[in-house]
């Protein structure tokens, strides 16, 4: 249920603190829309206004001001209590800012890092609250912007008018949304007429250029009816509506209302117990969604047994943390509602909203979203997204961008744009969930096929041959704990698909590996790369893979950081660099203590002996017998030039850290990517008395000594599996 804000008087109330005056509704002016004559709100032009456009204060300030009589602070206090309850006992500041570039005023609420640092809106922790006045047939808004509540019944006149208007405008005016060629899926569901009590499965070979709607949804625990080799003939004879799961029944009803004859549902249009049919149809996903007249994305239901057209109560739209109370707060005719940053409001630089639904966190639904030329999302509100426009019922400005850059997958101009698009997609895709781990590559195979069509590049286990030098630079996100090696083989270790959890290429990182893509200089060369797939889908499941590289290589050692799980230290030249390993390195990779005290120390002394600039005694004083030391190899992949505007004047070097493969002697497995900035050389320092035994304290030096590192490296050919 919505919150209600201060009454619509154009003059701030007397009981309003000085700092809140600029947040009151006199900031907004009313003007008539030239086209419709309807009243609309814009931000009042007040260049002489001395107040900032945002507040940043500890929660206790809002509470004291509310107790002192400020009605605006009373409202803000209640918003904070519901949206950011953790801020109540914190000394950190809560930042609230009003935005002027939205048709309806929007308030961004952020739990800032401290009382003085301005945290940018739409940061990973920001929340958006929209302010509006309720508009219905009985109410005329004379001051402020009027918006309707989100209808519970998706078959209502308002909802159907919204959908029909979006679809009609797109079909008539949007040339980029039209399919380039007509190609039907192998099977479709004939939904019949409005009064029919059954539907049936049909082969599409005789349907010509029939129009169809595709369905994107979450299966949930189970789907009560699927097509199998045993029942396919019966389903072609007819399926009673009551036999369909609730979500499928609603989809049939909605498609009938739009006047479209055919519907594609994966559970019914793919033979689920036939591995061959599944692989063939999975390889056609790009065409299934790109050629559909419209895709229905059911974000408001977590499983196929939940309908989506009639949600029984407004309480079902309450966010997952239950932050909104059942009864609205009474503050006159102003209202406020939380806008989930999901669907078309989601920005790829943000974490997935914790209040978001299952649909946005499932692996398969990403390619269904990306490949659809027209997408209608059923969530808290109705959202429309096509190749040229995006609309939503809340009319927020947050729907004015593409999720993965400025262009959709069908608008990419060249191979470089396509490869960059792919990496951004992988960053989002890698944090999604799968019921079956081996669906990871098949679940994005349709997008891979579309990228292939635009680049003509060879595709190998989630990487592109013509972009291999940059595709190899993926890393496990350091804030995500390293997991064990999956029990099921998914991909070779050099592929991002081989690990569980989120990966990134550093697009938004100051020291990003791909910050200046064009200027990357490769040192190692890719001699060959290949992967073997199972079945008939060249973009599907992988059974094996191999990468052959030639470049500067050195044998060295690593040991774990006992304080940070998944972080390791790698000895490289006369410095130590951090490694956030792709996966948890198993204990069997670290030899027993007897090896550490004998053979292990001899190897370490051999490494140190070639350096000269580092004292062996310092290493030995660190009590290596208490460390888990393992041998590893560092391959110099390449380097990036200095990053403009950072003050760093030296290059950023990238190293591929390898371990010996347990399965095949003489070949290697990837352990992770490590990087070193030349201006951030780390050298040994005396062991601090407060440090845990076996750890070193570092101090910054002028530069990373690449001369020494280059001297101990020798060009070799290595095979990575």
Image (cartoon, helix red, strand yellow):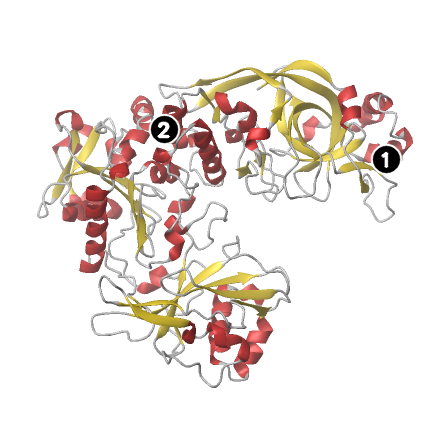
Real-space Cα separation, disc 1 to disc 2, in angstroms? 55 Å
Quadrant in which residue 593 is drawn = top right
Residue drawn at x 41%, y 56% is 340
In percent of width and height, residue 306 lies at 29, 50
Q: Is residue 511 left or right of residue 702?
A: left
Q: Residue 288 versus residue 469: which sits nearer the camera?
A: 469
Picture disc at residue 691 = none
In percent of width and height, residue 80 lies at 51, 68
Q: Is residue 566 above or below residue 35?
A: above
Residue drawn at x 54%, y 76% is 19
* Residue 640 appears in the figure: yes
Task: Give the class, few, some or many, for how many residues have Cα within 10 Å of label 2's Cα (few <14, many ≥20).
Answer: some
Q: Is residue 505 left or right of residue 384?
A: right
Q: Nearer the viewer, mark 1 or mark 2?
A: 2
In percent of width and height, residue 48 lies at 51, 72
Task: Please tell me whether mark 2 sits on a helix, a strand or a loop.
Answer: helix
Q: Is residue 151 left or right of residue 326?
A: left
Disc 2 designates what residue? 450
Task: Give the class, few, some or many, for how many residues have Cα within 10 Å of label 1's Cα (few <14, many ≥20).
Answer: few
Disc 1 designates what residue? 623
């Amino acid at each position: 249920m919505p919150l209600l804000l201060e009454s619509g008087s154009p003059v701030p109330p007397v009981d309003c603190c000085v700092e809140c005056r600029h947040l009151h509704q006199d900031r907004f002016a009313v003007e008539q829309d030239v086209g419709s004559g309807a009243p609309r709100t814009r931000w009042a032009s007040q260049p002489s206004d001395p107040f900032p456009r945002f507040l940043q204060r500890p929660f206790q300030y809002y509470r004291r001001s509310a107790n002192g009589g400020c009605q605006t602070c009373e409202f803000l206090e209640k918003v904070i209590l519901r949206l950011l309850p953790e801020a109540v006992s914190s000394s950190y500041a809560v930042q609230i800012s009003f935005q002027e570039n939205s048709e309806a005023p929007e308030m961004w609420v952020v739990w800032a890092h401290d009382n003085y640092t301005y945290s940018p809106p739409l940061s990973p922790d920001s929340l958006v609250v929209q302010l509006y006045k309720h508009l219905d047939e009985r109410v005329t808004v004379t001051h402020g912007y009027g918006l309707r509540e989100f209808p519970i019944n998706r078959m209502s006149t308002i909802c159907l008018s919204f959908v029909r208007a979006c679809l009609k405008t797109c079909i008539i005016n949007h040339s980029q949304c039209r399919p380039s060629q007509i190609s039907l899926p192998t099977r479709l569901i004939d939904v019949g007429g409005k009064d029919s009590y059954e539907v049936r499965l049909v082969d599409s070979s005789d349907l010509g250029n029939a129009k169809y709607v595709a369905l994107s949804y979450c299966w949930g625990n189970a789907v009560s009816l699927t097509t199998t080799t045993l029942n396919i003939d019966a389903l072609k004879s007819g399926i009673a509506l009551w036999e369909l799961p609730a979500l499928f029944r609603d989809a049939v009803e909605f498609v009938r209302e739009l006047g479209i004859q055919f519907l594609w549902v994966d559970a019914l249009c793919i033979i689920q117990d036939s591995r061959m049919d599944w692989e063939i149809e999975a390889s056609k996903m790009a065409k299934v969604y790109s050629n559909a007249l419209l895709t229905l994305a059911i974000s408001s239901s977590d499983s196929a047994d939940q309908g989506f057209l009639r949600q029984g109560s407004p309480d079902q739209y309450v966010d997952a943390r239950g932050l909104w109370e059942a009864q609205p707060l009474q503050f006159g005719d102003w209202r406020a509602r939380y806008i989930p940053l999901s669907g078309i409001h989601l920005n790829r630089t943000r974490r997935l909203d914790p209040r978001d639904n299952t649909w946005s966190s499932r692996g398969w639904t990403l390619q269904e979203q990306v490949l659809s030329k027209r997408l209608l999302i059923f969530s808290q509100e109705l959202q429309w997204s096509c190749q040229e426009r995006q609309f939503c019922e809340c009319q927020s400005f947050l729907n004015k961008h593409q999720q993965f850059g400025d262009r959709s997958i069908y608008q990419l101009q060249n191979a470089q744009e396509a490869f960059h698009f792919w990496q951004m997609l992988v960053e989002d895709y890698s944090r999604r969930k799968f019921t079956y781990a081996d669906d990871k590559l098949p679940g994005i195979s349709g997008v891979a096929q579309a990228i292939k069509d635009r680049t003509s590049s060879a595709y190998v286990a989630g990487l592109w041959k013509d972009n291999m030098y940059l595709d190899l630079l993926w890393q496990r996100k350091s804030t995500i704990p390293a997991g064990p090696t999956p029990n099921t083989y998914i991909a070779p270790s050099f592929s991002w698909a081989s690990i569980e959890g989120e990966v990134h290429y550093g697009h938004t990182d100051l020291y990003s590996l791909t910050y200046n893509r064009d200027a990357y200089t490769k040192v190692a060369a890719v001699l060959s790369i290949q992967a073997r797939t199972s079945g008939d889908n060249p973009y599907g499941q992988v059974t094996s893979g191999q990468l052959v590289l030639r470049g500067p290589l050195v044998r060295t050692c690593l040991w774990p950081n006992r304080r940070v799980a998944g972080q390791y230290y790698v000895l490289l030249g006369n410095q130590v660099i951090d490694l956030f390993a792709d996966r948890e390195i198993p204990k069997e990779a670290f030899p027993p203590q007897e090896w550490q005290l004998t053979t292990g120390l001899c190897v370490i002394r051999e490494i140190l002996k070639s350096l000269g600039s580092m004292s062996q005694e310092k290493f030995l004083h660190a009590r290596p017998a208490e460390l888990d030391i393992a041998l590893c190899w560092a391959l110099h992949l390449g380097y990036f030039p200095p990053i403009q505007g950072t003050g760093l004047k030296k290059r950023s070097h990238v190293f591929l850290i390898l371990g010996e493969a347990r399965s095949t002697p003489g070949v290697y497995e990837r352990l992770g990517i490590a990087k070193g900035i030349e201006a951030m050389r780390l050298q040994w320092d005396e062991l601090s008395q407060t440090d845990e035994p076996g750890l070193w304290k570092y101090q910054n030096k002028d530069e990373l000594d690449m001369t020494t590192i280059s001297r101990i490296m020798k060009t070799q050919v290595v095979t990575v599996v």
